[in-house]
Image: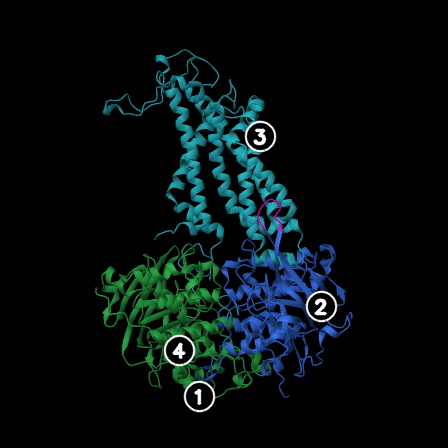
Chain colours: A blue, B green, C cyan
């Protein structure tokens, strides 16, 4: 897989169609908080995603990392139009998706699918696995041309035996269920898969098998992935490029090794330093950046840079001016006034 | 029972710059930031002594259920030394949590517990209920995974902390509250005085876990059992909590049993590791030797399954363990790991190996073929997948 | 990776080569239900009442094994006292036997056994109709409100709230007065149209939680039409709740019908129901108590046994509420 090297500072580029497989621009997703009472007036807005721009090319994996509440899952769902974005644009194969009706979205759904985190909740417990995998074929009128064979083929593809297709989800282990979820997502031969924490609910020994499967499938089918996760090492393992999110914004993005080896944003640095490694000697010797406090509420995010309340570099300007996500001389875009410039 | 004199708490002075750790790759990129708070590491806290305070001998736990008898724990033995951090690692259903709940006496009545749990030489399973209560919560305290369910939502944090003290010691409520405030300060909750009057839902996840830790150490315990204390938390908050756990442990001079599924957490936090699989301990030893020279294929398989934060994926492909953990109702005969083990031979399928000493000092493994692992250059190589050999 | 190749469990219900958990939900429900003693007893009692009432005097023109009609009058024998005897002769009784009029006769000489059986039939029919209608309407409204949310939900649920605030008995009384003599079918249907709100609330709650489940989200991501999501993906997951609620509403409906008829607003003479019988003979409590007790016993038997069945079903569908001790 080739790593995209032509990293362009997104905000300055003109919108152009057909360049990338998926192009997300200034995506905003606010959820209204309603008060009680008869009118249920909107009393506040949860600013889950606040102006996210990113793109994915054919056959590549974009890793999206961040802690809970950073808006990474909401971004994934908004891309698929499972949430209607408050504003912004989502272009898939050059076509604008925001504002399309359910009917107009129908053909797009074939090309974009999602795999969820919880393999216990993502499969309908009342349907046998065959029916679960057949569902997309039936909904899209493809059941007639050899439906059962297609289902068997899909199960084989994800490493399950088709003979087990008439069993119900509860008869499978977590890893096997996650494979069923992947088979369902692949049924319509999509070009892009949004993988929302696909392995974080699985046991370590099982997780590796699913990660390997995802890699194999990408190679065989030429899929593009948006891999959303909080586990930094899994993201490093599978991604070509990575975007780090904090409180609804992308704060740093770049080619994988660039970002992991030369993180420029204080948050990325703290995140990397906090992630535990299975290497006792290094772990004990390592100096960790321990951030103080917790992530602020997305109901009322800090002014200026959203990370400033926990940042050890924060100064006056950080509360006034929001840093743009641009390349500051370190090879990839960073949203920090005091981004660390490392010699390359 | 008489209450021992209350040892005054004197938080061990923590100065990260006092310890000259070798500068590693991860910290190099941070050297420009002086103001940054650098965390405490295991090497920086007081080392364990040789005195054994908690000994678990041949502990078994069974649960009768609708589907049959669940053999949740099948013969766990370990010792915990003073000030030691013992990590218990395993996947879901390995019995790691159940064995600790048994120590705390928190299992449901239906559970059948056998074996011996010795606290400073006294068998807790043979004690009167009253003496058990005297130990649990005071000498042995617990930190749970989910502080939201472990804290009572209708009482203030201060009340709950004071209650924890008053359950074991007679003192004026005011004194207990003062102690509670002291504890909140210790675990790094700002404005402790005001926070005593807060309810759990007013705290963030990290703060709640801090409050849980405060509650655990408020009676000066000798042993803290931490069951997945950071699993529900984010990475940056996890780092805070783990550091706090070490700091607090040093302040009250306690030992910790740290239960987790995260090998990374164990690597940084534990002096010794106990690996559990299907209700049995399968490997026990110093953290360094278990991670570097695993003598049980399961441990090696776990290590091969986790991607590294250091290297990219281009080079290394993950080496998963095939299959899934066995049902605790119908365990396979012989070694429970044998159906998934690339080293398994006929003897593995008929005879369950005991946890026996291997080559290293104090390094135990339950495997017939640990010597083959010892002979291998890379212990994870047995788990290499077909596609990897092709590629 | 294939399915775990574990040894088949000792449980014969499990399919070959499957682990012990590999039991379909229906099997588990059945198993738990049959372990529930009260539910089993309830089922036997209710089955007996059902069989007795419909087979004895016949139904819809089909004759039963009991030769007397609930309408035909006859000569009063022994002041209409019950001839049913259960005390054997060797204990000083008159031997086990039904006699001419096991439940006695009413004041104009109608066989009271036949009358009670007719009453039970009518009560059961009304109760089941009420349950069916209330469940269907409640499920539909609850499902639509819960799935679509927004304005649809607001309108439907406010309407439901209004319905709930009006005492059921009052509306039912109005309906009973208007339709009571047009037969039990109409009566049952209309009462059902009044008592659906609790069902709608229950279903709305279920839908609200299920619609946020990831498998529903997955269906939406596939572009599945709303109707298919509701009926294929969500509704089957509420079957347990619906069955339990429907069962318990049958028991309530029996009591509601009795109450209405007791007030003289339900089934009208010459047809009869259990409640109506009690109403008619409540003054005979002292003089001829059997006229009061027989329908009373049947009301209690029906309502109680169905309640037990409902409890058993709830435990069977939701085992978390009760731990089965081995």
Q: Chain of mark 4?
A: B
Q: Residues within 10 Å of mark 4 (few under 14, many from 20)?
A: many
User: Which mark's residue is nearer the viewer, 2 or 4?
Assistant: 2
Q: Chain of mark 2?
A: A
What SS does tag 2 mark?
Answer: strand
Which is more toward the observer, A238 or A7? A7
Q: Is residue C175 left or right of residue C227?
A: left
Q: Are marks 3 and 4 on the same chain?
A: no
Image-quadrant location for residue A197:
bottom right
Which is more toward the observer, B36 or B259? B36
Q: Are marks 1 and 4 on the same chain?
A: yes
Which is more toward the observer, C61 or B30? B30
The part of the chain drawn in magenta is A35-41
Instruction: Give the CA distance from mark 3 to mark 2.
Output: 56 Å
Mark 3 = which residue? C190
Instruction: Give the CA distance from mark 3 to mark 4.
Output: 70 Å
Residue A158: mark in rendering: none
Instruction: Determine whether C118 is above or below B52 in the image.
Output: above
Image-quadrant location for residue A123:
bottom right
Instruction: Determine whether B349 is above or below B381 in the image.
Output: above
Q: Chain of mark 3?
A: C
Residue C308 visible at all: yes
A111 part of magenta stretch: no
Instruction: Give the CA distance from mark 1 to mark 3.
Output: 84 Å
Q: Main secondary structure of the magenta part?
A: loop
Mark 4 = which residue? B270
User: Which mark's residue is nearer the viewer, 1 or 4?
Assistant: 1
Instruction: Give the CA distance from mark 2 to mark 1.
Output: 47 Å
Q: What is the residue that sits farthest to the left in this orientation?
A: B1
Residue A25: mark in rendering: 2
Mark 1 = which residue? B20
Residue B30 percent across, percent down from the top left? 54, 83
């Amino acid at each position: 897989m080739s790593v995209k090297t032509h990293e362009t500072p997104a905000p300055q580029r003109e919108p152009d169609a057909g360049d990338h497989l998926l192009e997300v621009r200034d995506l905003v997703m606010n959820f209204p908080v309603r008060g009680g009472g008869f009118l249920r007036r909107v009393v506040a807005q949860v600013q889950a995603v606040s102006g996210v721009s990113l793109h994915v090319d054919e056959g590549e994996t974009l890793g999206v990392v961040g802690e809970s509440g950073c808006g990474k899952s909401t971004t994934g769902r908004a891309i698929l139009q499972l949430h209607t974005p408050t504003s912004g644009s989502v272009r898939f194969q050059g076509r604008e998706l925001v504002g399309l009706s359910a009917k107009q979205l129908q053909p797009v759904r074939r090309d974009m699918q999602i795999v969820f985190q919880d393999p216990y909740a993502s499969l309908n417990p009342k349907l046998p696995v065959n029916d679960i995998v057949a569902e997309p074929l039936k909904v899209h009128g493809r059941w007639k041309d050899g439906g059962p064979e297609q289902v068997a083929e899909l199960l084989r593809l994800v490493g399950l035996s088709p003979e087990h297709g008439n069993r119900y989800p509860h008869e499978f282990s977590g890893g096997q269920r996650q494979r069923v979820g992947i088979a369902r997502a692949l049924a319509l031969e999509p070009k892009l898969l949004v993988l929302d924490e696909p392995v974080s609910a699985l046991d370590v020994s099982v997780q590796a098998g699913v990660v390997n499967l995802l890699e194999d499938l990408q190679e065989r089918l030429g899929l593009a992935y948006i891999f959303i996760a909080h586990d930094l090492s899994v993201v490093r393992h599978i991604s070509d490029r990575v975007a780090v999110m904090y409180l609804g914004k992308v704060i740093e993005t770049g080619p994988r090794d660039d970002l992991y080896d030369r993180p420029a944003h204080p948050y990325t640095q703290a995140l990397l330093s906090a992630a535990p490694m299975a290497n006792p000697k290094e772990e004990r010797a390592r100096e960790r950046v321990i951030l103080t406090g917790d992530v602020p509420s997305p109901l009322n995010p800090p002014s200026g840079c959203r990370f400033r309340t926990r940042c050890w570099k924060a100064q006056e300007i950080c509360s006034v001016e929001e840093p743009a996500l641009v390349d500051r001389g370190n090879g990839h875009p960073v949203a920090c006034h005091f981004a660390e410039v490392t010699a390359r | 029972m008489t209450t021992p004199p209350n040892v005054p708490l004197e938080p061990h002075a923590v100065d990260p710059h006092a310890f000259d750790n070798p500068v590693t790759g991860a910290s190099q990129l941070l050297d420009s930031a002086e103001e940054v708070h650098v965390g405490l590491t295991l090497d920086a806290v007081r080392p364990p002594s040789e005195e054994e305070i908690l000994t678990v001998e041949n502990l078994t736990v069974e649960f009768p259920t609708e589907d049959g008898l669940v053999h949740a724990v099948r013969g766990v033995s370990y010792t915990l030394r003073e000030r030691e951090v013992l990590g218990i690692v395993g996947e879901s259903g390995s019995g790691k949590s159940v064995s600790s709940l048994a120590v705390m006496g928190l299992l449901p009545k239906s559970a059948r517990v056998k074996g011996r749990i010795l606290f400073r030489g006294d068998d807790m399973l043979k004690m009167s209920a009253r003496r058990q209560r005297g130990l649990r919560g005071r000498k042995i305290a617990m930190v749970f995974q989910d502080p939201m369910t472990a804290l009572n939502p209708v009482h203030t944090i201060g009340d709950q902390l004071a209650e924890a003290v008053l359950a074991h010691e007679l003192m004026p409520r005011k004194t207990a509250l003062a102690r509670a405030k002291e504890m909140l300060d210790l675990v790094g909750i700002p404005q402790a005085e005001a926070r005593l009057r807060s309810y759990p839902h007013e705290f963030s996840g990290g703060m709640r876990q801090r409050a849980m830790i405060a509650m655990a150490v408020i009676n000066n315990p000798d042993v803290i059992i931490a069951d997945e204390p950071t699993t529900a938390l984010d990475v940056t908050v996890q780092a805070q909590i783990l550091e706090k756990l070490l700091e607090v442990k040093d302040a009250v001079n306690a030992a910790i049993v740290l239960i987790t599924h995260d090998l990374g957490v164990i690597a940084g936090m534990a002096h010794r590791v106990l690996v559990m699989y299907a209700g049995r301990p399968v490997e026990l030893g110093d953290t360094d030797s278990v991670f570097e020279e695993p003598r049980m294929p399961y441990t090696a398989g776990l290590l091969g399954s986790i991607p590294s934060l250091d290297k990219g994926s281009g080079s290394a492909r993950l080496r998963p363990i095939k299959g899934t953990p066995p049902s605790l109702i119908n365990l396979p005969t012989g070694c429970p790991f044998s159906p998934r083990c690339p080293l398994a031979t006929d003897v593995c399928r008929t005879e369950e190996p005991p946890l026996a000493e291997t080559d290293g000092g104090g390094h135990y493994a339950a495997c017939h073929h640990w010597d083959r692992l010892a002979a291998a250059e890379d212990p994870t190589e047995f788990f290499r997948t077909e596609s990897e050999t092709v590629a | 990776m294939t399915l775990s190749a574990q040894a088949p469990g000792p449980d014969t219900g499990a399919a070959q080569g499957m682990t012990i958990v590999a039991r379909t939900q229906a099997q588990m429900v059945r198993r738990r239900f049959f372990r529930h003693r009260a539910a089993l007893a309830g089922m036997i009692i209710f089955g007996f009442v059902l069989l007795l009432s419909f087979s004895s005097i016949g139904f819809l023109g089909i004759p039963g094994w009991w030769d007397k009609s609930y309408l035909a009058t006859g000569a009063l024998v022994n002041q209409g006292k019950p001839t049913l005897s259960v005390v054997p002769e060797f204990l000083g009784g008159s031997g086990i036997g039904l006699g001419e009029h096991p439940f006695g006769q009413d004041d104009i000489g109608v066989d009271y056994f036949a009358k009670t059986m007719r009453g039970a039939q009518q009560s059961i029919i009304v109760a089941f109709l009420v349950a069916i209608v209330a469940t269907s309407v409640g499920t539909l409204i609850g499902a639509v409100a819960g799935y679509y949310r927004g304005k649809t939900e607001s309108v439907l649920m406010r309407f439901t709230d209004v319905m709930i605030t009006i005492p059921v008995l009052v509306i039912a009384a109005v309906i009973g007065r208007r339709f009571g003599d047009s037969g039990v079918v109409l009566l049952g249907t209309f009462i059902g149209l009044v008592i659906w709100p609790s069902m709608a609330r229950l279903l709305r709650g279920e839908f609200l939680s299920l619609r946020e489940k990831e498998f529903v989200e997955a269906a939406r991501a596939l572009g599945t039409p709303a109707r298919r999501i509701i009926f294929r993906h969500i509704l089957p997951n509420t079957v347990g709740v619906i069955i339990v609620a429907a069962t318990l509403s049958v028991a309530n409906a029996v009591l509601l019908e009795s109450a209405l008829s007791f007030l003289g607003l339900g089934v009208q003479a010459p047809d009869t129901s259990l409640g109506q019988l009690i109403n008619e003979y409540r003054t005979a409590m002292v003089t001829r108590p059997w006229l009061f007790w027989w329908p009373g016993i049947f009301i209690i038997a029906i309502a109680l046994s169905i309640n037990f069945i409902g409890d058993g079903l709830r435990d069977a569908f939701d085992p978390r509420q009760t731990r089965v001790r081995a």
